[in-house]
Amino acid sequence: MNTRESMGRRVLAYHEHSKHQPQRFAPGPGHLDWANQPDPFRTYAGAPQVRLPLVADRLTVAFEDLYRPSAGEGDAIPLTLESVAALLELSLGLSAWKVHGDSRWALRCNPSSGNLHPTEGYLVVPTLSANGAGPGLDGGVYHYVSRDHLLEQRRGMDPGEVSAWNALFPAGQFLIGLTSIHWREAWKYGDRAYRYCQLDIGHGVAALRYAAAALGWQARLLTAPATRDVARLLGVESGGVRFGVNDAEPEHADLLLQIAPMGEPWVAMSPKVASLVELAGQGPWMGRANRLSRRHGMEWPLVDEMAETTRQPWQVESRAPLAAPLPRLAAIRGDDRGRMGAATLIRQRRSAQQFDPGATLDREDLWRMLDATLPRADQAPWDALPWSPRVFPVVVIHRVPGVEAGLYVLVRDPERVEALRAALDGSFLWSRVEGAPQHLPFFRLRSGDFQESAYWISCRQEIASDSALTMGMLTVFPPELATAPWIYRQLYWEAGMVGQTLYLEAEAVGQRGTGIGCFLDDGFHQLIGLRSEGFQSLYHFTLGRPVIDSRLSTDPPYPAPGS
């Protein structure tokens, strides 16, 4: 019987099973079947298409200004087809095409493990007007195709449904849904793929929150709706007729984000989701999902089992209450580099493939990057989450002049300091770092050269030792995980959001970051003397000065208008 307790045990068993070990990697394919590499773009054949304008370059807001606390009424850009187009362009859209010889592949504003992009985006929206000439957008459910910057209409509203549908949306507000196609990651990573899919959802949430800030909007996660209702609203029920006709790989619903203007009173749309689901279910869904691989040489049933195990029931509130209201701290801002246009900086984000082992990171830039990961009230991206921080970067400093090489920890929730001290090596110093801002809860644990340890723990990847610093994101495994297994997904979402924040902050100071999914879980735990199963490392990250591969050329993400 699938009691919640047994499902919680299943989650913990999966986590142990999918760990990399010194003597073996987590179960994976062992080789890459290039002939069946999944198509990175889902499309729905036969669905009506709405081409979106490329308007993000019209935004004049600087990257620094995305951290401004909630502004007053009137600062938000009105909700129109054009503003939605800008949101999608700067969050889930393409940022460039890379070219090497005969090979060409897309990069996106939202990072992805292995650039495989399991995340799909859906728009649930009322009827919209257009800013300029041309039609707006009919109310309904749409799938976003990043390759072509267009929407595919999956469910339109009949004339008799339009008023009832539009009435469910507060003025100027709408929903974005994110789903995962697990096969895209499992093709390369096998059983560990579920972890990476959930990290990418976190990348996507932060990308959407930053893009919303550029428009004067806020974005918040809705935690109450059941996973099944999210799937029904987005039209992605696994095994349903929409995916069974041509054996298209299924999508699994993950979450809904509510987008609203800053300065407006916040009224969560969670109670309206059931009505939206009911209306959407009364009519036909348009389009047929494409098959991503011609054949599947290996299947990974444990990944699908985890997707089912971590589904959230409607009647259970998954919110972990905030221990205290989020503070209104003034953010540390650096020099004029952060005055770069937000659209430019967001689209120049890249994952570094190699670092200069002789380069250093400025100490003030380190403070700035760490500070950006601290949750603040009404500020991107952390006001998107309704729970207290559960992710605590353990930082290995290699080359930051003015900061000793060694092990450090950033305690993003002061309420967790004592729990962390009790969980880690008892001989750690826990000393405040000289020169660090007073409000920054950054502690030195142990001095020393840990480059070789970082290299070994990161599956012998030189990016972890050649960088200026690397980190493991130590994450709370709360007791309620045993009876609320969907929290497991949320932990990865938060870790992915930390990663996306660091990606952008690194770009803002002329550095570059990259996420590390391949690491020895328990090897890292040994390094920090972890003595409690109540914490686990879920994501690793490294940053420094990149070495650019001159063999690659870069093409713009989309053809110029009119070309």
Image (spheres, grey):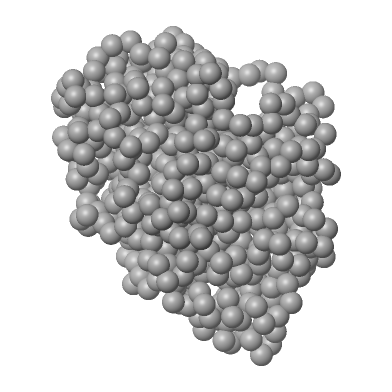
Q: How far across and down, in percent of the image, does residue 220 sit?
A: 41, 60
* Total number of numbered discs in the rendering: 0
**Observer-nearest residue: 119 or 77?**
119
Asked where in the image residue 43 lies, by quadrant, the reply is bottom right
User: Is residue 525 rendered to the left or right of residue 104?
Assistant: left
Residue 464 visible to an observer of this rendering: no
Residue located at (47% from left, 41% from top): 13
Residue 41 visible to an observer of this rendering: yes
**Observer-nearest residue: 217 or 145?**
145
User: Is residue 178 rendered to the left or right of residue 537?
Assistant: right
Q: How far across and down, in percent of the image, does residue 309 sit?
A: 52, 55
Residue located at (42% from left, 71% from top): 315
Extreme residue in the bottom direction? 160
Asked where in the image residue 370 lies, by quadrant, the reply is top left
528 vs 56: above or below: above
User: Is residue 395 rendered to the left or right of residue 200?
Assistant: left
Residue located at (74% from left, 42% from top): 38
Extreme residue in the front direction? 1
495 vs 283: above or below: above
Q: How far across and down, in percent of the image, does residue 477 sit?
A: 35, 44
